[in-house]
Image (cartoon, grey):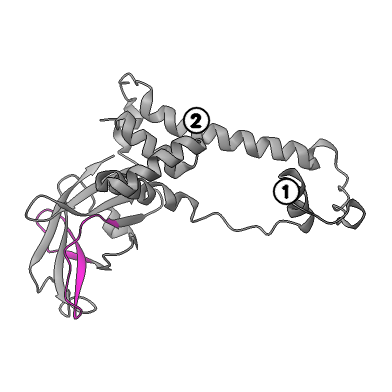
Amino acid sequence: MPPSQEELRYAEYVLGVLDADARAAVEQEMRTDSAAAAAVELWQRHLMPLSEDISPVQPADYVWVRIREAIGLDVPAVSRRPTPPAPTRGGWWNSLPLWRWVGAGATLAAAASFMLWFVMPRAPQAPTTAAANAGPDYMVASIAQDNGVAGWTATMDLKQASMVIVPATPTTLAADRSAELWLVPPGEKPISLGVIVSNKSTTVHLRPDLLARLSAKALLAVSNEPLGGSPTGQPTGPIIAKGAISGA
């Protein structure tokens, strides 16, 4: 189901596309309403990892001078302002203004596409035979505790052969214990996917033999193990959360 309009407002807050008044309203809600604060935090978990692969770029000195001039701050005289580097030859392809506009347009298009994905109705389309046979590119699982509350969520990118496990409301373990993730294919023994943590996401590389075992009949489970993981290669402690895998 698409999120409510209120949920979209929290997503827009995380994306930074709200105006000053709307941002102030959301921040006031976060201070007074724990549900609003939790919703914003959830959107941050969903969206902030998208920026992790963006490398920082140090702007040239003259960029900060122009920013200070634009907002009216005291700046050195124009005669002392660093001169921007001369543009290299190459015509429109090397045009800095052109690529600034292209970058700004791409950013706005990405933000618009993100919001339209949620709010625009989408008619169901019958998959082609090739698409139906290819299977999903992603799989997901909600790893729930016995009380039904999700302890972790797992997203599997089959093309990149990786799984990202994000803590939701995991069980607090003792200092000398670890949470270990297991893949449980139907009719097979559990396969360890490694120790996961409760305060940040964990990424697991999926070997070809693990990819072949991912299906809607398989389960993900988390067990309470000695610090560092099971010493036997199989669960030795109690299972504290489990969930079925499904296509996404």
Task: Estimate the spatial distance between the alpha carbons at disc 1 and disc 2, rounded to whole Å.
Answer: 26 Å
Marking on residue 67:
1
Say which quadrant the C terminus sits in: top left
For the point 49% across and 42% down, which residue is it? 16
Q: Which residues are magenta?
A: 166-192
Q: Which residue is labeled 2 in the image? A: 112
- Tell me if 11 is positioned left or right of 220 in this view: right
Percent position (x, y) of residue 19?
51, 35
On screen, residue 208 above or below 101 = below
185 or 82, nearer to the observer? 82
Percent position (x, y) of residue 246?
21, 43
For the point 41% across and 47% down, which residue is it? 47
* Residue 211 sits in quarter: bottom left
In the displayed image of the protein, which residue is found farthest to the right? 79
Percent position (x, y) of residue 146?
7, 55
Marking on residue 192:
none
Q: Is residue 241 magenta?
A: no
Tell me the element at label 1. Answer: helix
